[in-house]
């Protein structure tokens, strides 16, 4: 994976991080990820390096909160 790819961290399984990319999941070695990476973070994968996209993660969480709020409105 030499190109830049965006995904969302789905879960951690031991030394593996499961990332959702375009609706599919792919496993990556945990040691590729920054220690602050968490479930739900939007990430960018560049070869063997992973960067957490904090701004996009915050925006995604806000969108989810807004949707949940709409869902539970009376």
Image: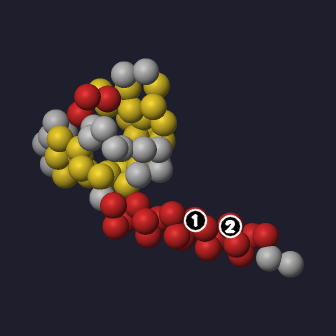
Q: Are marks 2 and 1 in contact (CB under 8 Å)?
A: yes
Image coordinates for residue 11, horizontal then vertical, percent: 48, 36
Find the residue positioned furthest to the right: 74
Image coordinates for residue 20, horizontal then vertical, percent: 43, 44
Callout 2 secondary element: helix
Residue on which disc 2 sits: 68
Image coordinates for residue 4, horizontal then vertical, percent: 19, 52
Name the residue located 42 percent from the left edge and 44 percent from the top edge: 38
The image's colour scheme reads secondary structure
Can see residue 21? no
Residue on which disc 1 sits: 64
Name the residue located 54 percent from the left edge and 70 percent from the top edge: 63
Name the residue located 36 percent from the left edge and 44 percent from the top edge: 37
Callout 1 secondary element: helix
Direction from residue 74 to residue 31 in the image, left or right:
left
Direction from residue 9 to residue 51 in the image, left or right:
left
Find the residue positioned furthest to the bottom: 74
Question: Callout 1: 10 Å neighbours few (<14), some, many (20+)?
Answer: few
Question: Callout 2: 10 Å neighbours few (<14), some, many (20+)?
Answer: few
Image coordinates for residue 36, horizontal then vertical, percent: 34, 44
Give the quadrant of residue 50.
Answer: top left
Q: Give the Cα distance between marks 2 and 1.
A: 6 Å
Q: Is residue 7 above or below residue 33?
A: below
Give the quadrant of residue 53.
Answer: bottom left
Quarter holding the C terminus is: bottom right
Give the quadrant of residue 1.
Answer: top left
Direction from residue 1 to residue 27 in the image, left or right:
right
């Amino acid at each position: 994976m030499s190109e830049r790819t965006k995904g969302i961290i789905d879960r951690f399984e031991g030394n593996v991080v499961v990332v959702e990319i375009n609706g599919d999941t792919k496993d990556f070695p945990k040691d590729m990820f920054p220690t602050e990476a968490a479930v739900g973070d939007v990430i960018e994968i560049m070869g063997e390096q992973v960067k957490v996209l904090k701004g996009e993660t915050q925006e995604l969480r806000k969108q989810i909160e807004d949707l949940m709020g709409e869902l539970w409105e009376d």
